[in-house]
RNA sequence: GCGGGCGUGGCGGAACAGGUAGACGCGCGGGUCUCAAAAACCCGUUUCUUCGGAAGUGCCGGUUCGAUUCCGGCCGCCCGCACCA
């Protein structure tokens, strides 16, 4: 009978409307209950949601609903990471305005998200492109500026020639722009930088405290920050070198090394082509000038990355070895020395560094081994083309001979710190970081304007607070490449706020990662017009208890947000908050198999018919019926057409089916494979739940009935399995193991069906009816966070007038699950042979006797004598024969 | 090159803390119902087997009464970083 079927298409909008009307997902800032902040990384408003969004937001929603049922004041907000290139590209292609495009996309995506049935507090919705948001960001920029946390400096930057903008180091992946995918070039530009390096030590140290973050993400951040301990030391330039390059002012070269122990293995000193000294000499030495220019050319392009051949040129300079006044080392300019790290100069020890060895071998500089591997005869130890970077004892190193590597490092540091040259120690222990400052200037229109004015007389002048926000002009044209803001006829021309003369606005906008570095703070009080945050509300809600998003943000967004929290603490915006996210979960992708026709064209899953037999699965084109090869399973992408539109799934099966499916099958941190069969399985289960709850409603006692203390063994068994499931699902929700919760609920459904089948309903007593009442309510409560619409429909079918979304979580009876008799598996020599049903508190001698009386045990022993019986209480018995 | 992770049926995956390997789902096979189909329900589904059992969690070895789990060494796949001195 069709009327018996659960109709998601009718039920889902109905419950969504009721939730909205009753406004049950609004979080009240005055709520005295303990808070729980669950947040999913907010989306970029591209126009349509995809299955990855559905998976991400469903996980967060399960937690939000579960925690709400457990009595927390749950903050679960949503917003839009709304600035960025695609809006400008769309403007270019469709002649639409980025703002119109973005707000239209937000409207359609909001509608899609609502159709998923997410329990979000929409009253806190924010869009980063809204002046009511970015005005606060501009204010914060000025606060940072006043504190020296943002600086302007000339520097080599990554230039994306396709997007016509600068990229941060974190946004360059394999030498390519993270969005455009083209090779980036190096350019010298004056840019704004956030001083993230000022927090390098702290950002690294605090990673240890983030115990609810994936180990992988913590490691990635630690590697990115890249702390190393070493020694900065100065080499004196030979005076005679004035002849080589007569106008050199420098008298010494400072290098940084983590291996001061190998100083006696030094064969050369090398400068980065960008080193000021190299540049200076190049001005007087045409050969070197040519070499530096060559390095610059290849430094930007792929050859540098792919060939990585060591090249250098002797500058003619000579420097004195720090421990030997008569030992002179040649100074090269070398392409493999980076100006950005350390001092831009190194000393080369070919025997113990592969790069130095390659270089030395190419230019005939030789090598001296100074660390001898354990067990090697020092006299026979030679290095040819593989450097030795392991431990050992020092050799060929005068006063260091016989020391271990750490001892030698220490000894060199002590000696060079004690040696004073030109009034300073010759060497100094130093900690270096790989992390660079965060360049945030972008030559784009659709971003947050940087609120400063360049005055020919006063220099950089902050925009007065009263003049904020600096709003983006609306009248724009996007028909030329480059920064549209810079071309706007009037916008940038302003009077200097300080002296009144003609000045120009900064036309660069901020990196969009700035927008997402503090949005989670804004959610706590988005109504505040005065200040970016209300520190009281930040203190109330932060840190975020559970943050969920893709691992692709492991470094970029998550590191920036951690930096912002610290910087905002200094500017007084976040109270004493240190870390923004205590719990982090990085979920896997939604992947799908691909279908490619013989002519190479990709086909959508909706253009395919699937069959299966014992030989395997087959795919056929719907239009021609031609058989198609099933291709590899890959991340859903438009180019491979292996996408499934959430809207179609919601229309065909309902949101609960999509939610249930993305939570089932795969552990949440791994990729989930979207399959049509799996979706149908989920849809079938929903019908099964509906039938099962219908049956339970028919036999259950009225609302409020409680099982009595004296239940029959059969009734007790049902209660027991229900409470066991409850305990397991609780654990699974707490640990975000949604796939296990799903399996548990399937299992409970199976067991409840069998239980109903096993009893004769017409002679059922009140006790059993009360047990089924409890069972039904717990069953529905367990599945409701995952399938909230079905949950409501079932809850109503059980006679409730209120909502399961606001019902308290059932209380597990932990004493109940302890049984009086237990089933012990019995092993003989480690292999299971039998089960022993025995009293829970049976003494060991009784167990031993019972075990030896078992037929299968005697058979397995084959007459051997029993050497030993191991009894693990309430777990297992092992007979050793 | 450096760092990290993962290898379990036809497939996705379970297995708390060293204690019954394969829960649960998908697929497949068989059956019930039906004129038929769909839906639903029931049974089976690691491999081999003389039906007693035997082998089995990438491979080799170790520790243990007992190892998917711990240790050592290989093989394969995936991810991150990459001339960082």
Image (tube, rainbow, N blue to C red):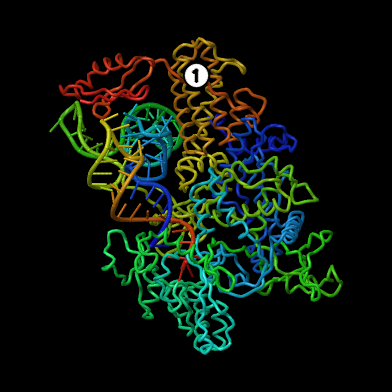
Q: Position of residue A102 (x, y in %)?
A: 68, 58
Q: Where is residue A11 in the image (x, y as percent from the top left)?
A: 62, 35
User: Residue at 60% of width from left, 25% of height from top?
Assistant: A797
The answer to which image quadrant residue A59 occupies is top right
Tell me if residue A113 comes above or below residue A747 in the rendering.
below
Q: Nearer the viewer, residue A75 or A642?
A: A75
The answer to which image quadrant residue A665 occupies is top left
Q: Is residue A491 left or right of residue A749?
A: right
Q: Residues within 10 Å of mark 1 (few under 14, many from 20)?
A: few
Q: Nearer the viewer, residue B43 or A252?
A: A252
SS assignment at label 1: loop
Q: Which of A860 and A872 is in front in this view?
A: A872
The residue most toward the right is A500
Q: In this view, does A527 lie to the left or right of A310?
A: right
Tell me if residue A280 comes above or below residue A820 in the rendering.
below
Query: Which residue corresponds to mark 1?
Result: A815
Q: Position of residue A150 (x, y in %)?
A: 69, 62
Asked if residue A625 shows in the view, the reply is: no
Q: In this view, does A12 lie to the left or right of A865?
A: right
Pointer 1 chain: A
Q: Position of residue A796 (x, y in %)?
A: 62, 26
């Amino acid at each position: 009978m069709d009327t018996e079927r659960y109709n998601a298409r009718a039920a889902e909008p109905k419950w969504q409307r009721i939730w909205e009307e009753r406004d049950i997902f609004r979080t009240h800032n005055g709520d005295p209950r303990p808070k729980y902040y669950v947040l999913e990384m907010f989306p970029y408003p591209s126009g349509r949601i995809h299955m990855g969004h559905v998976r991400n937001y469903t996980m967060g929603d399960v937690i939000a609903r579960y925690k709400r049922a457990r009595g927390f004041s749950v903050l679960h907000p949503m917003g839009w990471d709304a600035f960025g290139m695609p809006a400008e590209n769309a403007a270019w292609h469709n002649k639409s305005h980025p703002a119109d495009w973005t707000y239209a996309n937000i409207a359609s995506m909001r509608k899609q998200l609502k159709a998923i049935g997410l329990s979000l507090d929409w009253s806190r919705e924010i869009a980063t492109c809204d002046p009511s948001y970015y005005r606060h960001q501009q204010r914060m920029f000025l606060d940072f500026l006043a504190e020296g946390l943002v600086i302007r400096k000339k520097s080599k930057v990554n230039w994306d020639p396709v997007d016509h903008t600068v990229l941060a180091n974190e946004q360059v992946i394999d030498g390519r722009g993270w969005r455009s995918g083209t090779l980036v070039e190096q350019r010298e530009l004056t840019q704004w930088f956030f001083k993230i390096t000022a927090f390098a030590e702290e950002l690294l140290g605090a990673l240890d405290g983030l115990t609810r973050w994936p180990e992988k993400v913590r490691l990635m951040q630690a590697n990115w920050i890249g702390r190393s301990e070493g020694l900065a030391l100065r080499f004196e330039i030979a005076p005679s070198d004035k002849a080589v390059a007569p106008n050199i002012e420098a008298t010494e070269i400072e290098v940084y090394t983590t291996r001061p122990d190998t100083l006696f293995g030094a064969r050369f000193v090398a400068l980065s082509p960008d080193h000021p000294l190299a540049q200076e000499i190049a001005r007087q030495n045409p050969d070197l000038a040519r070499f530096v220019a060559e390095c610059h050319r290849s430094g930007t392009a792929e050859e540098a990355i792919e060939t990585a051949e060591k090249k250098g040129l002797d500058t003619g300079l000579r420097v004195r070895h720090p421990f030997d006044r008569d030992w002179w080392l040649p100074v090269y300019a070398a392409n493999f020395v980076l100006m950005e790290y350390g001092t831009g100069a190194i000393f080369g020890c070919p025997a113990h560094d592969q790069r130095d060895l390659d270089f030395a071998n190419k230019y005939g500089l030789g090598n001296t081994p100074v660390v001898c591997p354990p067990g090697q005869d020092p006299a026979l130890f030679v290095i040819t083309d593989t450097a030795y970077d392991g431990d050992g004892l020092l050799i060929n190193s005068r006063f260091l001979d016989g020391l271990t590597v750490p001892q030698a490092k220490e000894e060199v540091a002590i000696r060079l710190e004690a040696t004073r040259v030109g009034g300073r120690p010759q060497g100094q222990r130093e900690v270096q970081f790989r992390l660079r400052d965060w360049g945030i200037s972008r030559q784009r229109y659709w971003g947050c304007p940087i609120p400063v004015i360049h005055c020919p007389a006063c220099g950089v002048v902050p925009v007065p607070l009263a003049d904020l926000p600096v709003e983006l002009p609306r009248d724009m044209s996007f028909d030329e490449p480059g920064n549209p803001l810079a071309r706007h006829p009037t916008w940038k021309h302003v009077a200097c706020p300080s002296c009144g003369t003609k000045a120009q606005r900064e036309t660069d906008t901020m990196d969009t990662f700035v927008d997402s570095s503090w949005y989670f703070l804004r959610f706590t009080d988005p109504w505040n017009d005065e200040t970016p945050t209300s520190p009281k509300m930040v203190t109330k809600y932060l840190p975020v208890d559970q943050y969920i998003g893709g691992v692709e943000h492991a470094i970029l967004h998550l590191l920036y947000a951690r930096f912002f929290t610290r910087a905002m603490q200094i500017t007084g915006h976040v109270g004493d908050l240190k870390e923004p996210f205590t719990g982090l979960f990085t979920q896997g992708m939604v992947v799908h198999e691909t279908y490619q026709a013989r002519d190479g064209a990709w086909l959508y899953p909706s253009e395919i018919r699937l069959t299966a037999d014992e030989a395997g699965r087959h795919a056929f084109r719907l239009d021609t019926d031609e058989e198609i090869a099933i291709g590899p399973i890959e991340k859903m992408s438009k180019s491979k057409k292996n996408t499934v539109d959430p809207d179609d799934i919601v229309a065909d099966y309902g949101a609960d089916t999509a939610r249930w499916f993305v939570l089932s099958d795969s552990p949440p941190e791994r990729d989930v494979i979207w399959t049509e069969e799996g979706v149908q399985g989920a849809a079938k289960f929903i019908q099964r739940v509906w039938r099962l709850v219908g049956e339970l409603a028919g036999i259950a006692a009225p609302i409020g009935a409680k099982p009595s203390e004296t239940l029959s063994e059969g009734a007790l068994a049902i209660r027991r399995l229900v409470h066991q499931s409850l305990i397991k699902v609780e654990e699974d929700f707490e640990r975000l193991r949604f796939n296990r919760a799903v399996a548990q609920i399937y299992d409970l459904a199976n067991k409840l069906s069998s239980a109903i089948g096993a009893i004769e309903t017409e002679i059922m007593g009140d006790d059993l009816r009360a047990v089924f009442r409890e069972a039904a309510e717990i069953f529905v409560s367990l599945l409701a966070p995952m399938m909230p619409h079905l949950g409501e429909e079932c809850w109503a079918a059980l006679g409730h007038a209120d909502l399961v979304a606001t019902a308290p979580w059932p209380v597990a009876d932990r004493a109940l699950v302890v049984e009086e008799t237990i089933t012990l598996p019995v092993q003989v020599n480690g292999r299971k042979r039998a089960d022993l049903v025995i009293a829970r508190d049976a003494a060991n001698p009784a167990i031993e006797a019972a075990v030896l009386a078992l037929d299968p045990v005697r058979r397995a022993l084959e007459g051997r004598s029993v050497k030993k019986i191991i009894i693990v209480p309430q777990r297992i018995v092992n007979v050793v024969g």
